[in-house]
Amino acid sequence: MSFVGHIRDLAAARRELETRRLLVVGGAPDADRSAFLDAVAREVADEAGLPVYRFRVADAGDRSGEAGRTPGEAADAVVEACRGVFVVHPCVVVVDGVPAGAADAVPTGTADGSLLAGLISAFAESESFLLVGSTDAREGASALPSDGCADGWALLARAAVHCDRGDPRAAGPLLRRAVEAHQVAGDRRGEAWAVFLYGRMCRLRGRAEEARRLLHIARERFRAVGETPGEAWACGELARLATRSGAPDPDAFAEARRLHERVGDRRGAAWAHLWWTVARADEPGFPWREEFTNVQGRFHEVSDRLGTAWTLHHHALTLARADGTDGVGGTGGTGGTGERRREADRLFEGALALFEEADCPHGRAWTMLEYALRSPAHRFLNGEWAAEIRHVFHGIGDEAGEAWVDLAEAGPSPDGEPPYELACRYPTALLDTLGWTEAGEPLIPRAARDTQPEPRPGFPRPGDRDRPDDSRAHVRLTLLDDVPVPDVPARIALQVVPGPGHPWSTAPLPPLTARATSLGHAEIDPAHGVPADGAEFRFTPHRPGSHRLRFTVEDPATGTVLQQIEAEIDVVPSDPGPHRPTAPAPRPPARRA
């Protein structure tokens, strides 16, 4: 038996559970702990083919007619329940909500009358796996292994899961809290991973410049602390940024793969191998069949279902787009086409099943879309196919994905121009690689599924294409200092830029007022500026993370609000030198530039 307090890594917890059949997780908020327990249980149950049973301690005292139970009686009920079928038949049992006091000072394999000791005793001779979740009570933290960064690592893990699912919106708040936890603990390695995940989140949201800046910073910090696996991951993410411009860089993926292999990171090497293969899959003569098969084997070795799912997705996509020169079906005639289509269907179906098991709606939506486009029989069996796929994209806030579904339904435009909802989100170079089959089905660029870009501010609407900005005035914000860090002012310039047809283009700007407001933990000074005189503000954040600022441009003569805009600025953790675990210092006053 084994007692593990704070858990950093799902794979480590899984190995611990498989070795000793008992895992106790504590020191985390309820939602974090429960999600972690469920993830471990699902991993073990899937591989061993066992059922999973979940039991909450609180439920033992809340059943009908038993609400008056004492905590001790509730604990006895939990142990008795676990002595039944759960112990006799191998399974995975998750018991969550164990009071922290019940886990205090429980040495390995002993019993002291506590709930945890009773559970250990009940499972002593069992072939089942037992996962116990201890409630987060910091009074009992002395009984847990000393690990001041555990909460920060748990938050990073949750943020990474949201990014894997294709839902980066939920990652931002988790990353802010993780950065704070790692800074308090003086963990430079944890800070580096937080910056890396910020960069990854920005890449997913289509914010290429911010992503590039943050990933470069993360790579340098990884090098500074000797974290070669992190350096390899940062190199891979930077390579993925290049694909957004429609020009993938296979050599960069190959270098990331070499770094992963050098430190024995098999999972990282598998992902780098996958993206290298995807970057080259459309090259004439490239042996994509062999490479996709090799990648799939790599992911199977490390039990990475998500990686396997994306491998099957891109393998199916390549097969469906093959021109008959891949050696399937002999001459590549009608029979070969049908055989390739059937094989692609099988791969798409396998990817769909794995995306559903891995709870990745982003991959599921893209696979549903490509499957529908490449398999007319599958699409026509479901008259609501487009609505169903839109619903999945909508569930993770992916408006760009919904726009691709709209394009698939509408077909190519008569003038050959991409629809506005795509043009305002993706670079022109990427959209130039959009193709169409003879049947009028879109050949969506592979890189389109790597991001969920938001509309670019100020991008002209369709009706404005003939007169883009001639009669309008726009607000332009410029960050004058690179890499904002906590408690150090950064300068922001605000300009009002009139178009050539606007009256202000030939006359001085009127004395407009620009009012600045911080919508988070930051200060901005001065509160007002005059764009005609060159409005400049000093933005002083008090914590890392994404900060929102609001600027309101008004005409003081009439009291009219002319324009209101909001901007997001990413603040990276400061790196003052050697870190030592200390208590948080009092917040210093903002320094003026």
Image (cartoon, grey):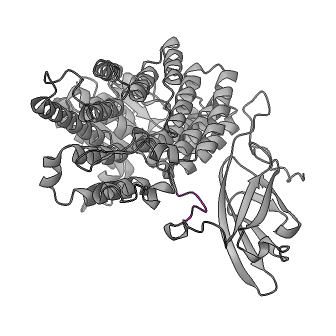
Q: Residue at x 37, y 57 (%)?
A: 402
> Quarter-wise, where is residue 418 in the image?
bottom left
Say above or below: 97 vs 47. Answer: below
Q: Residue at x 84, y 50 (%)?
A: 588
Depth check, front residue: 10 or 70: 10
Tell me which secondary structure the magenta stretch mostly adopts.
Answer: loop
Depth check, front residue: 265 or 318: 318
Say above or below: 2 vs 370. Answer: above
Depth check, front residue: 434 or 64: 434
Left or right, 327 with respect to 432, comes to left
Residue at the extreme left of the image, as rendered: 335
Left or right, 250 with respect to 43, comes to right
Residue 347 drawn at (x, y percent):
22, 33
Depth check, front residue: 431 or 309: 431
Say above or below: 438 vs 10. Answer: below
Can residue 509 be spotted in the picture? Answer: yes
Say above or below: 490 vs 240. Answer: below
Can residue 395 be spotted in the picture? Answer: no
Left or right, 459 with respect to 394, comes to right
Which part of the image, by quadrant, shows the N terminus?
Answer: top left
Residue 459 drawn at (x, y percent):
57, 61
Residue 449 drawn at (x, y percent):
41, 43
Residue 15 drawn at (x, y percent):
38, 22
Which residues fall within the magenta stretch?
455-460
Q: Is residue 304 magenta?
A: no
* Label tally: 0
Q: Residue at x 78, y 71 (%)?
A: 505
